[in-house]
Image (spheres, rainbow, N blue to C red):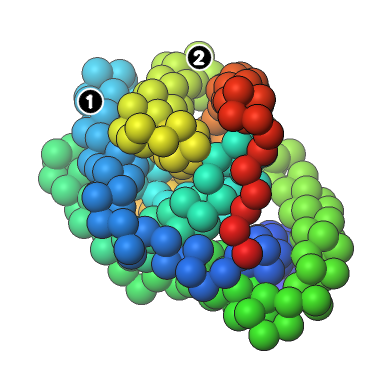
Amino acid sequence: MTLVHVIGLAIRGSIFLLVFAIGLDATIREVSYLVRRPALLARSLLSMSVVMFVFAIAVVLLFHLDPEVKIALVALAVSPVPPILPRRQAKAGGSHDYAIGLLAAAAAAAIIVVPVAILLAGRIFDRTVSVPTGKVALIVLITVLVPLLAGALVRRFFPEFATRAMRPISIVAMILLVTASLPVLFVAWKAMWALIGNGTLVCLALFTIAGLIAGHGLGGPDPDHRTVLALATGVRHPGVALAVAWTNFPDHKAAAAAIVLYLIVAILISTPYIRWRIRQHVASEAAAGGPAARPA
């Protein structure tokens, strides 16, 4: 087994543990939250998959980008919620139930949405591109659905263990993720730097800003829903986009570099939004007489 395989396994394992820890703080009812709210589910998928897909197509047609970067941006536009995002959404005052439900629903929808969107994008760009449905399904199962449901089931049958184990597992997983990601950043740095001056950085920033605006607008009247959907629309799962890039451009580094660069840009741009939503949430709670308790 090579060092590359070890790093890949470490990253996947750390993400599995992170989502498992999120599941330890969730219930089956929260995982299925959007199943009982079809209107909110429709708005969520409209924001994440339709609006951002159209926006990504428009951006890559306007900018002269490398073909693999174009496909990577489209893949990001239809990718599900990043596994670690619910913690940022909750920190910003977002609805915990909705954050967990959207994590699960977007992952399930991606199994169908991503292959169809990539096929359509290939026709628009007059290129033969695709991604196997099975590959997308495997990624979302390993990094989202299986660990999330496993954690929720542990919480259901062993609540005391879930409460005790959640924090230590999260800490170990984050340490493992950071350690395993550093070599990836080091290797991708030169390719990332080459993308900064050719319009890619601008496109990635526009993509994140558009996602935050679209999600906030389509989140509905509940401000906590707006926070969750804004972050989910602006910040996407890199694993799915990387799978698309590696399937169609195995010998090119530009797509992978663009996705890694996107993660950095998305974190930087979403941080002011999170701080603003925290202030809004605190002010709302103060006006209402204190924080509302989360239902058991």
User: Measured along the vertical axis of the image, is residue 94 above or below residue 31?
Assistant: above
**Label 1 crowd (10 A; few <14 / some 14-19 / many >=20):** few
The C terminus is located in which quarter?
bottom right
Instruction: Give the alpha-carbon distance from disc 1 to disc 2, as whole Å.
Output: 20 Å
**Of helix, strand and loop, which one carries label 1?**
helix
Where residue 6 appears, as percent x and y from the top left, is 73, 67
Q: Quadrant of residue 161?
A: bottom right
The structure residue drawn at horizontal position 82% and vertical position 60%, both measured from the top left corner, is: 167
- Residue at image position (59%, 29%) is 288
User: From this viewpoint, is residue 62 visible?
Assistant: yes
Q: Which mark is drawn over residue 58?
A: 1
In the rendered image, which residue does mark 2 sit on? 197
For residue 59, side relative to residue 8 (left or right): left
- The answer to which image quadrant residue 193 occupies is top right
Say what amino acid the circle numbered 2 marks. Answer: Gly
Q: Identify the residue shown where x is 26% and y is 56%.
A: 38
**Residue pushed farthest front?**
289
Q: In the rendering, at what x and y percent does residue 40 appear?
A: 31, 48
Q: How many marks?
A: 2
